[in-house]
Amino acid sequence: MTIKGGKVEKIRAIETFRHPLYNSTWSTYDVALLNFEKPSTHSSVRLGDAGGSDNKPGTMATVLGWGIMSGEDFAQLLQSADAEIIPDTECAKYAIDTDAMLCAGAKRGKGICGGDIGGPLVTNNGVVVGIASALFTSAD
């Protein structure tokens, strides 16, 4: 795997902590934390405010992942797509639990795809506000 302009770092995970409210049917609370055997040499990220002040509707963000590009082939370079945080009223149309999840939309033909689940949603000011956990499409 290649990281454009960066270096690859391999660190063994020694523990996994799954969210206690995880629901595989609805993909709510679809997050886990990993405890690594040693610290990374890469810089840390800033996590979003639990109250949602970092993910207001209209906020621009970027979703990242190594998902499927065409056919069954996964990307060899980290991919990104611009996305906008969508209001809860719009999210609710897709049966999203807006107390546990947020929605972000990308231009048609862009966004997450198979294999991107678990990738971060990062605002343009460098704050991680979400994790890709589901893919919904709109005919609009």
Image (cartoon, rainbow, N blue to C red):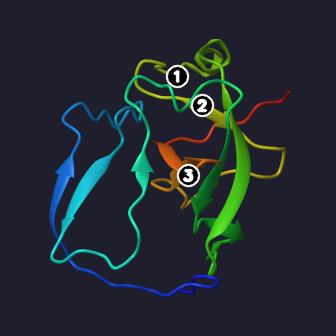
Taking the spot 27% from the left edge, 81% from the top edge, the residue there is 11
Task: Give the residue pinned by disc 1.
Answer: 96
What residue sits 42% from the left and 57% below the top?
A: 45
N-terminal-most mark, 2 or 1: 1
Q: Amino acid at mark 1?
A: Ile
Q: Which tag, 3 or 1, sits closer to the chain's start?
A: 1
> Mark 2 — residue?
103
Residue at x 34%, y 79% (from the top left corner):
41
- Dividing the picture into quarters, in which one does residue 105 lie? top right
Q: Nearer the viewer, residue 104 or 5?
A: 5
- Which is in the foreground here, disc 2 or disc 1? 2
The secondary element bearing badge 2 is classed as: strand
For discs 3 and 1, the disc positioned in front in the rendered view: 3
Q: Position of residue 97 (x, y in %)?
A: 46, 20
The amino acid marked with disc number 3 is Gly
- 139 in relation to 65, above or below: above
Answer whether labels 2 and 1 touch (C-beta < 8 Å): yes
Q: Nearer the viewer, mark 2 or mark 3?
A: 3
Q: How many marks?
A: 3
- Residue on which disc 3 sits: 126
User: Compared with residue 56, is residue 75 higher up or lower down, i.e. above or below?
Assistant: below
Q: Is residue 53 above or below residue 14?
A: above
Residue 109 image position (x, y, % from top left): 82, 51
Taking the view exactly as shown, the residue that stands out farthest to the top is 89
> Element type at marker 1?
loop
Crowding at mark 3 (Cα within 10 Å: few <14, some 14-19, many 20+): some
Which mark is on residue 24?
A: none
Image coords of residue 33 (percent x, y): 25, 53
Inter-mark Cα distance, 2 to 3? 18 Å
- Report x, y in % for residue 43: 41, 69
